[in-house]
Image (cartoon, rainbow, N blue to C red):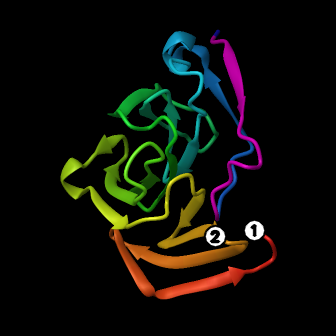
Amino acid sequence: MKKYWSLMILPFVVAVGSVIASLSLPKDSLLSPSQVNAQTDCPTKFAASDGFIYWTSGDNLFGATLSKNRVMGQGRTVNTGGWCKANLAVSNGFLYWNDANGDDHLHGVRINGLTWNTNSHRVVNTGGWRGVKFAVDSGTLYWAEAGELNRVAVRDLNWFANTHRIVNNGGW
């Protein structure tokens, strides 16, 4: 009989279009606590889409399969370095992140399940992204700026500036 951890993803970790309220994970599917909490000043961030869940821990990005009955598979390293304070979002096989410790840009990469496609990495949008929280769903990226909720189309790691719209100006 396997023992299970219960993991709650709080309401502030919400991806547009889908909400994960809770999931059960076999204890042996996770990395050891010393690996997970390698840097205590690095908050863990989550993103889930297309049957996979991704999370940051310390300076690394991890991932695992996520079954329809919310059971997580064995966790593994997807990418290393630079993830300590990055925010991330994933949708339709693309992972987006901002590098809070570095260049202030929004980055993107094609991700095939748990496989990072290095050759596809590109800067999606430049400047002003340090610390910005955002979500992406079905080719639309959402973020808050100056009290307004914004959206723009992103497809195949391309930013379509002419689609930028303010969705709501209610104190975001």
Residue at image point 59% right, 27% down = 41
In front of the other: 40 or 61: 40
Q: Could you tell me which residue is drawn at 35 percent across and 33 percent down? A: 81
The spot of residue 57 in percent (x, y) is: 51, 29
The amino acid type, in three-letter code, at marker 1 is Trp
Q: Nearer the viewer, residue 30 or 162?
A: 162
- Left or right of residue 62, residue 80 in this image: left
Per the image, label 1 sits on a secondary structure element best described as: loop
The reply to whether dot 1 and dot 2 touch (C-beta < 8 Å) is yes
Number of other residues with Cα within 10 Å of mark 1, as a class: few under 14, some 14 to 19, many 20 or more: few
Q: Which residue is mark 1?
A: 172
Q: Is 11 positioned to the left or the right of 63 in the image? A: right
Q: Is residue 86 visible?
A: yes
Residue that label 2 marks: 145
As drawn, 20 above or below 137: above
Determine the residue located farthest toward the left in the rendered image. Answer: 119
**For residue 79, what is the image quadrant?**
top left
At a point 56% along the width and 19% down the height, the residue shown is: 37
The magenta segment: 2-16
Residue 7 falls inside the magenta stretch: yes
27 sits left or right of 157 in the view:
right
- Residue 137 spot, x, y in % from top left: 55, 66
Q: Looking at the figure, which quarter contains the C terminus?
A: bottom right
Query: Where is residue 63, by image quadrant?
Result: top left
**Residue farthest to the right, as pictured:** 170
Q: Which residue shows up at 74% across the image and 80% down it? A: 168
Question: Where 41 falls versus 160 (above or below)?
Answer: above
Percent of width and height locating residue 68: 59, 45
Q: Is residue 4 magenta?
A: yes
